[in-house]
Structure formats: structure tokens, C-alpha cells
Amino acid sequence: MTRNLMILLSAGGSAALLAGAFLFQALGYPPCAMCLWQRWPHAAAILIGLLALRFPGRVLPLLGAIAAATTAAIGVFHTGVERDWWEGPSSCTGGSSLEGLTGADLLTVTGPRVVMCDQVSWELFSLSMASWNAIFSIGLVIGWIIAVRLSGASTAAGSSRSA
């Protein structure tokens, strides 16, 4: 197993999760605000992965691990909001106001769809999309950490060859 293979698997995992999120959105499951928050670290991890394939060292894989850990943490937090373990942001939970929506928006079928962060719109084996994102993202953190460790091993091997 090489550093670049682990980077490809980890960044590719983020790309797959992000593609899955967009697929669900295309299938009629619009994202809530917290769902959108979970997408940004995946996008960052993909960019970091592309850079890490070009530039050696531990810093970029470490940043990839941080990006994956960030989306995992948001996924865990979102899961807790969905399961009423703790309160979520008032801007996207049942406690928020409908400010900004007109009466016509609320009465029309074609108006904006309000997606609440504390409501599960899809689940598999009693786990929501946020839960699955957290689980898979924790796996990606492990992949990035392996890449960090392999970066250190290749650096140590390179320095012993030059001695």
C-alpha cells in the first residue's frame, strides 16, 4: 500500500460521498442547511487529495484527515439533532420561523420547499444520510491518517538512502 493509493482512496471516497449527495438531491431529496455544511469538507478533501498527489509530505494528507474529520463531526452533530439528542441551529430546525416566506409561498405546491435539519428525509437500516456520512467519513479519516504515516515512512526511507 502506497501513500498515493491511500490518498486516491480517501479523496475518491469524498468524491463518491459528494456524488451520492448530489444524486439524492436529483432524486428529489433536497438538502437541509446542515446537509450542505457536510458537503464543503468533502470538496476540500478532494482538492487536498489532488494537491497531495502532486506534492510530497505529510501536511496535505493531514489536512485531508482534518477535512474528513470535520464532515464526520458535522454528520454526528446532525444525527444528534435528528434524533433529538440535542438542539440544532434554530435557523433549520422546527423552532425556526418562516420569516421570508410569503403566504403564497406557504400555500402553493410549487413554492420553496422548507427542509428542516431535525427531520429525516431518508434512512437505511434506521440510519439517516447524516449518520451514513459520519460513518463513511470516519473511515476516510483513517485512510488519510494511513497516508500521513506512509508519507513519514517514505520520507524516512528517502533520507536513509541519501545518507
Image (cartoon, rainbow, N blue to C red):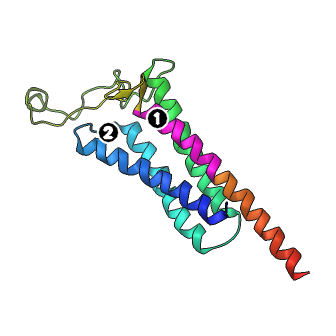
Relative to 108, is 14 above or below? below
Q: Nearer the viewer, mark 1 or mark 2?
A: 1
User: What is the secondary structure assignment of the residue under circle 2?
Assistant: loop
Name the amino acid, label 2.
Pro
Relative to 86, is 15 above or below? below
Range covered by the magenta-colored residues: 129-143
Q: For the view shown, which residue lies furthest in the front direction?
A: 1
Q: x, y percentage for residue 115?
A: 28, 32
Q: Quadrant of residue 102?
A: top left
**Tag 1: Cα neighbours inside 10 Å, few (<14), some, or many (≥20)?**
some
Q: From the viewer's perspective, is 79 left or right of 102? A: right
Q: Which mark is residue 132?
A: 1
Mark 1 to mark 2 CA distance (whole Å): 15 Å
Residue sitting at 7 percent across and 30 percent down?
A: 108
The residue identified by callout 2 is: 31
Q: x, y percentage for residue 22?
A: 32, 48
Q: x, y percentage for residue 125?
A: 42, 24
Q: For the view shown, which residue lies furthest in the bottom direction?
A: 162
Are dots 1 and 2 in contact, CB under 8 Å? no
Residue sitting at 69 percent across and 53 percent down?
A: 146
Q: From the viewer's perspective, is 110 left or right of 31? A: left
Residue sitting at 24 percent across and 28 percent down?
A: 98
Asked whether the viewer can see residue 4, the reply is: yes
Could you say which is closer to the camera, residue 87 or residue 80?
Answer: 80
Residue sitting at 13 percent across and 28 percent down?
A: 106
